[in-house]
Amino acid sequence: MYRCFLALLASLLLAGTAAAQSLRGFPPSALRGTLEVLQSPEVALNGKPARLAAGARIFGPDNLIKVPASIAGVKYTVNYTFDTQGFVREVWILTAGEAAKKPWPSTAAEAQAWRFDTVAQSWTKP
């Protein structure tokens, strides 16, 4: 009896954890692009040289933090933010479903001109 209850409880907890991981909220300042880690902290952001900030966080598709060296040499479709000094601060490697949400701004000018719906995690052009 207790084993069945524990098995049910464990399956519900795992299902809840998986559902929580699939719902990531991105800030309105997040831009879309491609990222390739060259030799940390050096990265190629949209094909141009950039640098990771001290304490930068890279979230994988499973929303777990990735070490830059573990993803080096592969181009990923990402959402990213900058810190106040212009360094890459946060990076989210997108799942196929997240990458399919379009439009998404790729420049700060687009982000200022468009409107962001925080709940739906979508952008609309004026």
Image (tube, rainbow, N blue to C red):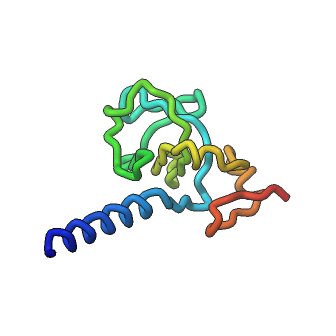
- Vertical position of residue 48 compared to residue 101: above or below: above
User: Is residue 15 toward the left or the right of residue 125 in the image?
Assistant: left
What residue occupies the far left of the structure in this picture? 2
Image spot of residue 108 (x, y percent): 68, 50
Image spot of residue 18 (x, y percent): 39, 58
The quadrant of the rendering that contains the C terminus is: bottom right
Which of 48/106 is in front?
106
What residue occupies the far right of the structure in this picture? 126
What residue occupies the far front of the structure in this picture? 1
Residue at 35% x, 51% y: name it.
64
Which of 69/41 is in front?
69
Q: How many marks?
A: 0
Image spot of residue 106 (x, y percent): 67, 44
Residue at 63% x, 67% y: name it.
118
- Vertical position of residue 92 compared to residue 68: above or below: below
Q: Quadrant of residue 42?
A: top left
- Vertical position of residue 44 compared to residue 29: above or below: above
Image spot of residue 102 (x, y percent): 71, 48
Residue at 46% x, 50% y: name it.
89
The quadrant of the rendering that contains the N terminus is: bottom left
Q: Quadrant of residue 47?
A: top right
User: Is residue 105 toward the left or the right of residue 82 in the image?
Assistant: right
Which of 85/49 is in front?
49
User: Is residue 125 toward the left or the right of residue 72 in the image?
Assistant: right
